Amino acid sequence: MFAPASGLKGVVRVPADKSISHRAAIIGSICDGPVAIQNFLAAADTRSTLSAIAACGVEVVNAESDNPVVKGAGLRGLATLMDTIDIGNSGTSIRLLPGILAGQSGSFRLDGDESIRRRPMDRVVNPLREMGVSIEARDGSYAPLTVTGGSVHGITYEMPVASAQVKSALLLAGLYADGPTEVIEPAVCRDHTEVMLDAAGARVEKEGLLTRIYPAERLSLDKVEVMGDFSSAAFWLVAGTIVHGSEITLKGVGINTTRTGLLTILLEMGADITLENERRQGGEAVADLTVRHAKLHGLAVGGGITGRMIDELPLLALAGAFADGETLVTGAAELRVKESDRITGLVDNLASLGVHIEAFEDGFLVRGIHGPLGGNFRSYGDHRMAMLGAVAGLASRDGVQVDGFDCVSVSYPNFLKDLESLGALI
Ligand code: S3P
């Protein structure tokens, strides 16, 4: 039971960035020589990526720690050692890995859990096929995927949805192509793959929403230092804003602007969040963030910014429950194909806690009359849904019971410890 909190106070070092940890392991695996990853996210999803590269013959030293060393096998050095590579719950692993597997010799079969098997894979399968990659999917759209390495052609691809996973898969495949590969995104989405490939020596160019990559001869990275995950920090930014008497400092958080749409929107709604000690770490921007309780007003959010806050949009519904007026989110149909259907799950859950919220095909509307009263909340096996339920409980009148909370191990294994350190009662 997550009991109502009377003020969350303290300093939290949020877990390492999940997206960057995945990329460090994947790009590291095709570098020449060892890549030392500092502050790797030691959680279920990113462990899946490390096991996947190990299953392709890449040696990983200290794989269980948060400082693994990936002994890069070179651009074309991966091998088929197992019938099936199990990537568990990790969408980023199953969508990015085909990009590098396209340039290897041999066939690789990728599969995952029930949630992964329901998620659309045609978004990477179709453009990779256009690049000449041999890739098979169940019913053309779903895991398991089988990728057989071979020749790759450079193409220009306009993505129908703003997906960093699709963009990344194509840019990685572009390393092996016979000419440049161009990916055009309909709206800005996270650019960590481009940033890291550039640091590893690949030739990458950006022109607005277009990213161009050239075939590579070799990549090398000595080390990658991973910063705190903005998407994990987001739970505390909202908790600190809506729980009376709170003041929370979050140390060393990534503030790459392709990720911080929630910060922009919360500030527009009246939140009290300050940034200090802004610095750069391996091409990425980092800062310490301090959030204090504040009164909010509702806002309409849609269009381009949703791609910069796709994983944080559900949290906005909770913030909206405390805001004056209405908070409207549109243009976010992608939420339906995440680890769970995050529109249906969110709206059913918050409505059952007494929040005035209604669902649309591509978003939701919240009337901020009062925050959650209390009751039961279902995680649907989705880590971000589970943590949202916990934050709802802290800000509720009567407390919230989250069923299936264990799935937080996917991205934030120490969530409860951090919550206790802020003075909350569980
Ligand atoms: C991610 C991209 C996003 C995000 C996911 C991580 C990434 O997915 O929701 O949690 O690391 O590239 P999409 O590419 O499907 O938008």
Image: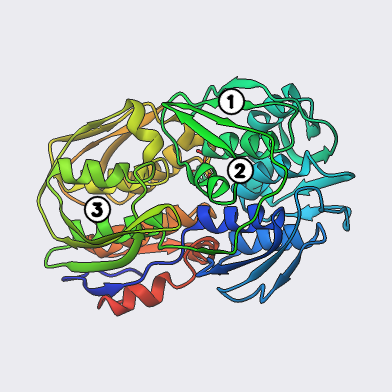
| Mark closer to the chain start, 2 or 3 | 2
Q: CA distance from mark 1 to mark 2?
A: 14 Å
How packed mark 1 is, by other alpha carbons closer than 10 Å (few <14, some 14-19, many 20 or more), is: many
Check the image and report above or below for 409 versus 267. below
The residue positioned 30% from the left and 79% from the top of the image is 421
* Label 2 secondary element: loop
Compared across the picture, whether 358 is left or right of 382 comes to left
- Amino acid type of the residue tagged 3 in the rendering: Pro
Q: Is residue 250 left or right of residue 281?
A: left
Crowd band around label 2 with a 10 angstrom C-alpha radius: few (<14), some (14–19), many (20+)? many
Q: Are marks 2 and 3 in contact (CB under 8 Å)?
A: no
Labels 1 and 3: the sequence-earlier one: 1
Callout 2 amino acid: Ala
Amino acid, disc 1: Glu
Circle 3 — which element? loop
Residue at mark 1 to residue at mark 3: CA–CA distance: 46 Å
- Point out the tag, 1 or 2, that comes first from the N-terminus: 1
The residue singled out by tag 1 in the image is: 182
Q: Quadrant of the C terminus?
A: bottom left
Residue 99 against residue 33 in the figure, above or below: above
Viewer-nearest of discs 1 and 3: 1
The disc at residue 213 is none
Residue under label 3: 372
The image quadrant where one finds the N terminus is bottom left
Visible in this render: residue 374? no
Q: CA distance from mark 2 to mark 3?
A: 49 Å
Is ligand 1 less than 8 Å from the beta carbon at label 1? no
